[in-house]
Amino acid sequence: MLKGSWCVSCNQWCPLECTERVQGLHKTARQDKGHGNELAEFIRRIEQGGEPLIPFEQLRNVTQASFAAVKSAHERVCIQV
């Protein structure tokens, strides 16, 4: 996909990369999704203690929904969660 001097490419499920051609050079713009900060906070909470970053109830709900989605796709039926 092109717009002006920008080129955006998406290669299936690989990260989205945007490049801009400026005076023959290519600049890359990448999204900061916060993974570095999340990992640093996770390590800090392990070392110093504190509440989990993601409450257990949310983890349980997401896991149940994921299993239900797989079962629903496999059996071609609706699964109530």
Image: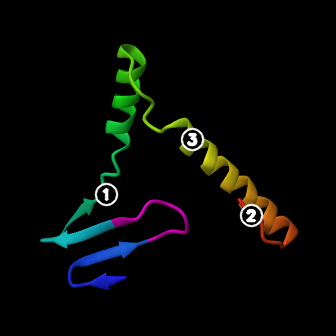
Left or right, 34 with respect to 56, comes to: left
Cα separation, mark 1 vs mark 3, equals: 29 Å
Look at label 3 and name its amino acid: Glu
Q: Residues within 10 Å of mark 2 (few under 14, many from 20)?
A: few
Which mark, residue 23? Answer: none
Left or right, 69 with respect to 43, comes to: right
Look at label 2 and name its amino acid: Gln
Residue 78: x percent and y percent?
A: 78, 71
The earlier-in-sequence mark between 1 and 2 is 1
**Badge 1 is on which residue?**
31
Residue at figure coordinates x 37%, y 37% from the top left: 38
Looking at this rendering, what residue extends furthest in the left direction? Answer: 23
Q: Which segment did they paint magenta? A: 10-17
The relative height of residue 52 versus residue 25 in the rendered view (above or below) is: above
The relative height of residue 6 versus residue 74 in the rendered view (above or below) is: below
- Magenta segment, prevailing SS (helix, strand or loop): loop
Quadrant in the picture for residue 8: bottom left
Residue at figure coordinates x 39%, y 15% from the top left: 47
Q: Secondary structure at mark 1?
A: loop
Residue at figure coordinates x 37%, y 82% from the top left: 1
**Badge 3 is on which residue?**
57
